[in-house]
Image: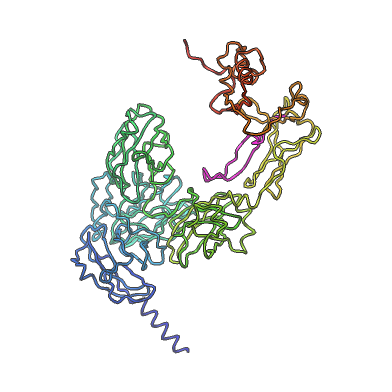
Amino acid sequence: MKKMATLLTVALAALAAAQSALPANTARVHYQRADGNYAGWGLHVWEDTTATVEWTKPLTQSGKDDWGAYYDIPLKPGAQKVGFIVHKGDDKDPGADLWFDLNKGRELFLKSGSTNVAYAKGAALNVDATKQPVAQAAPATPSAPAAPATTAATGNTPIPQNVLRVRYVRPDGKYDGWGLHVWEDTTAQVEWAKPLAPTGMDAGGAYWDVPLKAGAAKVGFIVHKGDEKDPGADMFADLSKGREVTVTSGKAEFAYGAPAALSDPPVPAGFARINYFRPDGKYDGWGLHAWEDTTAAVEWSKPLAQTGTNSFGVYWDVPMKTDWKKLGFIVHKGDEKDPGPDMTLTADRGNQAWVVSGKPEVYTTRPDTSVRQVGDLMRAQAIMLSRDLIAVKPELVQPGAFLTLHAAKDAGLKLTAAGVDGGDSLTLEPVDGGLNAALKAKAPYLANYALLRVRAEDRARIPEALRGQLAVSSVLPDGTVLDATGVQTAWALDDLYTYSGPLGVTWQGSVPTVRLWAPTAQDVKLRLSTSGNAETTVPMTRDAQGVWTAKGTAAWKGAQYRYEVKVFAPSTGKIETNLVTDPYSVALTRNSTRSVMVDLNDAAQKPQGWDALKKPALRSASDLSFYELHLRDFSAADASVPAAQRGTYLAFTLPGSNGNKHLKALADAGLKAVHLLPTFDIATINEDKGQWKTPAT
């Protein structure tokens, strides 16, 4: 056994060492098959390669290592991208054309069946290789580190001789406090507590010019802020590959060359720029509707045409008024809006905005679109049918896929290229056969969905999970994210928290009790204002049915109140604290700013004769004839009603008014009922008549 173990160790070591060093001016595609069968598989290549390849005569394998087979591709001078297909005859793997972005590195790792790749061994395979790379500013000549760098025609600041430029791109645009620690072949003397300050800022972000020793070959570096490193591991620049590198916040691998943004044309004076990115690259027909502080007169049917294309996608330069404050805009194609809501750029955030198709955010620093995120946590396409059953689109349920219900009480779930990050995880299991007859009858539009169930050991955690942010994800064993989405929870709440007791204010004698059904709330407080006193806060307690309760005193009679509710809001994706009136109010202050504690059984609240009033008996509903009447319009223009009572309930108490005479005539003619509407507060109408404005006649 000892001899066999030794032989095995030697064999593995030999295999690991089998990969030859990467030659100059060469890119390498590493290809891994689960079945280990590489016979007949070749590589078709095009674009920035000197190889002349026919479909019937692909590049053959250059060798094998502990990853799998690999192919070496000779490159043209200044190469930036190579298109490639792994194939065996007409059998392509995975099928789509793939792209090798040489700005990300010269080694690419690909697994059979996946379009996602990595540019470093052991890194997550989360870069979408179907996306064709955007041409970037050419890096300095790799063969001569000490040679003078050329100035790109884009306005990129020239790199001095004997200097390595380290660029740093943060999608959030926040560079304060970030410095650079360097070692190896540099003349800079740097302590961890005193990192290099940025040399400058430009359209590509922050950058540091690091002085080099004579004959320098490599420089180690870390971007950090105190003890926070970004992305974390030590990095090393190989100066034979260029004297300019770009670190993107959070990405494990850096790229040689300058950020693509440096090639973009500057924003003209007096304009604001809206940049737009579509993962599918299809921009035909998309225009920009703009309003507010722009001098452009834009109609919906005639949107602004695209000004041009840049490294992000397409853009519109919108002419602005002098001293502009706000630009409203919508990207649209006919009546199709992307993503949908009105968007706003304010001058205090800059003169550029970036919009990513399907995302509601308006970015004021360029977001990273090089890694595709699959899914959308705001869409809520998973539907809970009960406390532990979830219906999802069938494509999420694939052999071997990890199915997870993510829960975050702090609303901290984030969608990344590797899936959903943050919160706690509850395991989901597929239900054979999908929805049964009862569930299909309950939700017929979900009949073809797959059905998942929270595994037994996690079900006790569901009630608490429902009080925060939820998401469902499906991820294959190789890290490929199939989808991630938010969750609709209404039926789960019905299953767990159905309640048929009293709500709002109830009275026991002169003592009120206040109840609010809010099972997803994390906290509820009663904000109370008794006569002549400032608003005070009263804690409320939650029971097993999600009902929050506070018991008052006789002094609460007639008090104004509202609720302070801390709750996850799916509309914003955040924990919000809302001040709201009681949905079971029987009385409200002007403009519905507060509820009022009123007992409708109190004699003081009843009109004279109310208890003795008896409605005429109704033999059948078919005997009814209805008259629909607008509460305000009944008396708003009736000169027989005193001006102060026009448009109010009191107008119905005046038997001699023209309106009431007309109703009496209708009743005599056989009308049985009047339906009043609207009788509720209309938010856009100020109930304070003193604030109304009447047009001059």
Residue 136 horizontal/vertical position (percent) = 28, 51
Identify the image quadrant of residue 582.
top right
**566 in magenta:** yes
* Residue segment shown in magenta: 559-584
The answer to whether 650 appears left or right of 263 in the picture is: right
Q: Is residue 179 left or right of residue 598?
A: left
Residue 344: image x %, image y %?
Answer: 42, 36
Is 123 rendered above or below residue 414?
below
Q: Could you tell me which residue is drawn at 37 percent across and 58 percent down?
A: 127
Looking at the picture, tell me which residue is in the foreground, 599 or 411. Answer: 599
Image side of residue 337 versus residue 596, left or right: left
> Residue at horizontal 65%, vertical 30%?
594
Q: Position of residue 384 (x, y in %)?
A: 56, 54
Residue 536: quadrant of the picture: top right
Could you say where residue 569 lies in the image, as x and y percent from the top left?
56, 44
Which sits in the foreground, 533 or 78?
A: 533
Residue at the image position 38 percent from the left and 67 percent from the top: 121
Q: Main secondary structure of the magenta part?
A: strand
